[in-house]
Amino acid sequence: MREIDAQTIIDRVAAMCVSANRNLPRDVRRKFEEAAAAEESEAAKEIFRQLLENCDLAAESGLPLCQDTGLAVFFVEMGENVRVKGMTLREAINQGVIKGYEEGFLRKSACHPLTRANTGDNTPAIVHIDLVPGDKLKIGFMAKGGGSENMSRVTMLAPAQGWEGIKKFVVNRVAEAGPNPCPPIVVGVGIGGTFELAPTLAKKALLRKLDDANPDPDLQAKEEELLEAINALGIGPMGLGGKTTALGVKISMHPCHIASLPLAVNIQCHSARHEEVVI
């Protein structure tokens, strides 16, 4: 059994919280540059120029990419032969969030849902843990902003609605969201599972890099089909019109009950802040 000291997890989580909020992933920046070159609208080109300038300023100054530094969401794959020494894994992650958000001067957004009283340290984090074979710990972090999260939806389709029903729901959701999630967005789609699993699949799909290819050729084709349909809406960067409403669509699928077709859409804003470490 391999032991990992809790302090190691605390330090790595804290570093991820700070870095992800200051540095846009390279694949997202590349998509900005590609989209800017393809746009014909002067307004869309100007938005991309400002987004790229914002990336540079954040990296140089240490200021966050966006004032909404998000709720801290984690997807953890914990090897069955790993034990955390000193405290529980969940406690260590929360301590890392407290450290990172304090040291990075990041806004703490977690609050009581009814009284709206701020918890003061951006915890408790949202932590999803899967047990996997091996002796490693993989921690994926996402700083999830409120604007894009509010535009996400889950529904239970009738099985007969099939792919056409799925496509209609996803595209309509993006159309209804309009400029609210700060496009260009990334769209995570969870298909199947159960009522509670579909949105988890959709959100976890957002951790994939924009330039990766879905290993399932059929799902890869469906991602491209959805991306084309979403960009045909013409919402454009920041809702000012253009060819680029979404930078990518990522689908994750799981078997479901024969009587059900769960579907979830999780939208990520243009500040697609996420990082991953393996310990």
Image: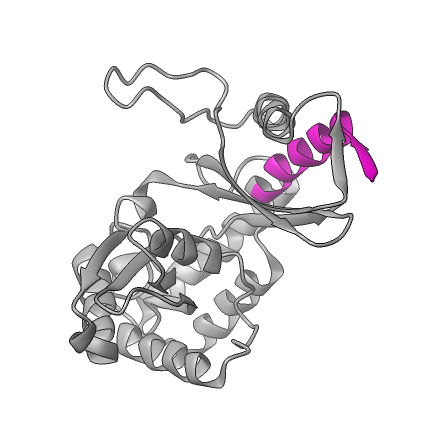
**Picture residue at 52% right of the left edge, 48% below the top:** 273
> Which image quarter holds the C terminus?
top right
> Which image quarter holds the N terminus?
top right
Q: Is residue 178 visible?
A: no
Vertical relation: 238 (above or below) 136: below
Q: Residue furthest front?
A: 258
The percent position of residue 3, horizontal first and vertical second, equals 82, 34
Q: Residue furthest right?
A: 2
Residue toward you, 23 or 3: 3
Vertical relation: 9 (above or below) 250: above
Q: Is residue 187 magenta?
A: no
The percent position of residue 7, horizontal first and vertical second, equals 76, 25
Q: Could you tell whether 136 is left or right of 249 in the image?
A: right
The percent position of residue 102, horizontal first and vertical second, equals 59, 21
Residue toward you, 212 or 25: 212
Q: Is residue 13 visible?
A: yes
For the rendered model, the colour scheme is: one colour
Q: Could you tell whether 97 is left or right of 264 in the image?
A: right
Residue toward you, 174 or 2: 2
Main SS of the magenta part reads: helix
Vertical relation: 233 (above or below) 145: below
**Picture residue at 47% right of the left edge, 26% below the top:** 107
Q: Is residue 11 magenta?
A: yes
The percent position of residue 248, horizontal first and vertical second, equals 43, 69
Q: Could you tell whether 61 is left or right of 187 in the image?
A: right
Q: Quadrant of residue 68?
A: top left
Residue toward you, 180 or 132: 132
Q: Quadrant of residue 188?
A: bottom left
**Picture residue at 56% right of the left edge, 72% below the top:** 211
Chain part drawn in magenta: 1-20
